[in-house]
């Protein structure tokens, strides 16, 4: 199995996090919406614009040469802001993506665990996320303690209690 390590996300990681937003938006086989198109959509751009704000926190997986291969992070939204997995003020929303070559090698689960530890340290009681109902990642999230709290025709909102 390929080796990776996890470090805190920094302000300079904004471009890579935007890459991961594009990966998440294009998760479905055959989907290839170009980066500018995805990031022109306010629902997607909202997760990375202005990175890194004071309450933004993330983790980045890097390979043996220090190249980023995946990231998970969270950001707070207000009820008046566009975000897909909003549940309540003060509940940060998580986004995750792993470069295609690095998937199914444990990076995603390791990122989720590291970020949950950070959220607990930051004093949050819950973490939220939004996922398409047919994305396998839903099973990954469930196995990491997330439960469905809302659903519409296409997406589900999941929440993990941290304490
Ligand atoms: C979702 C994603 C972040 C998971 O990261 P990952 O590094 O591939 O996940 P892991 O290797 O830690 O695998 C976690 C579990 O998912 C399973 N899994 C991985 N890829 C899978 C696939 N294509 N189909 C079904 N299950 C899969 C693994 O078997 C593993 O389960 P196990 O621990 O019981 O064996 C990553 O695949 C990704 O970036 N996908 C595209 C973007 C996306 O969908 N983002 C989420 C949007 S909400």
Image (tube, helix red, strand yellow):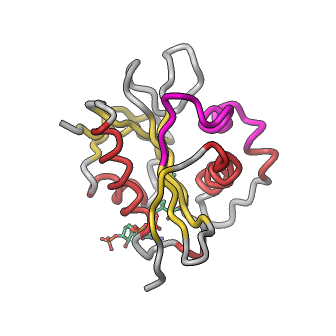
User: Can you say which quadrant of the picture contains the C terminus?
Assistant: top left
Based on the picture, tell me whether residue 51 belongs to the magenta stretch: yes
Rendered image quadrant of residue 98? bottom right
- Please say if 139 is above or below 116: below
Please tell me which residue is depicted at 48% across the width and 51% down the height of the picture: 8
Based on the picture, tell me whether residue 85 belongs to the magenta stretch: no
x%, y% of residue 37?
80, 45
x%, y% of residue 104?
45, 74
Residue at the limit of the structure toward the bottom, as seen here: 1
Please tell me which residue is depicted at 59% across the width and 70% down the height of the picture: 66
Please tell me which residue is depicted at 50% across the width and 63% down the height of the picture: 61
x%, y% of residue 94?
45, 41
Please tell me which residue is depicted at 77% across the width and 51% down the height of the picture: 35
Labels in figure, total: 0
x%, y% of residue 106?
40, 71
Look at the image and give the residue range highlighted in magenta. Answer: 39-58
Judged from the image, the quadrant occupied by ligand 1 is bottom left
- Please say if 67 is above or below 153: below
Dominant secondary structure of the residues highlighted in magenta in the image: loop
Q: Is residue 94 left or right of residue 27?
A: left
């Amino acid at each position: 199995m390929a080796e990776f390590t996890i470090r805190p996300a920094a302000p300079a990681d904004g471009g890579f996090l935007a890459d991961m937003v594009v990966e998440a938006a294009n998760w479905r086989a055959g989907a290839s919406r170009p980066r500018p198109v995805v990031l022109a959509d306010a629902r997607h751009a909202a997760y990375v614009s202005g990175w890194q704000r004071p309450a933004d926190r993330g983790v980045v997986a890097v390979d043996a040469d220090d190249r980023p291969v995946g990231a998970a992070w969270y950001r707070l939204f207000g009820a008046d802001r566009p975000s897909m997995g909003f549940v309540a003020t003060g509940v940060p929303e998580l986004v995750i993506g792993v470069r295609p070559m690095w998937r199914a090698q444990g990076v995603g689960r390791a990122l989720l665990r590291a970020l949950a530890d950070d959220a607990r340290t930051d004093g949050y009681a819950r973490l939220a996320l939004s996922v398409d109902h047919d994305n396998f990642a839903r099973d990954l999230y469930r196995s990491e303690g997330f439960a469905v709290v809302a659903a519409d025709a296409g997406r589900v909102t999941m929440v993990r209690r941290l304490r």
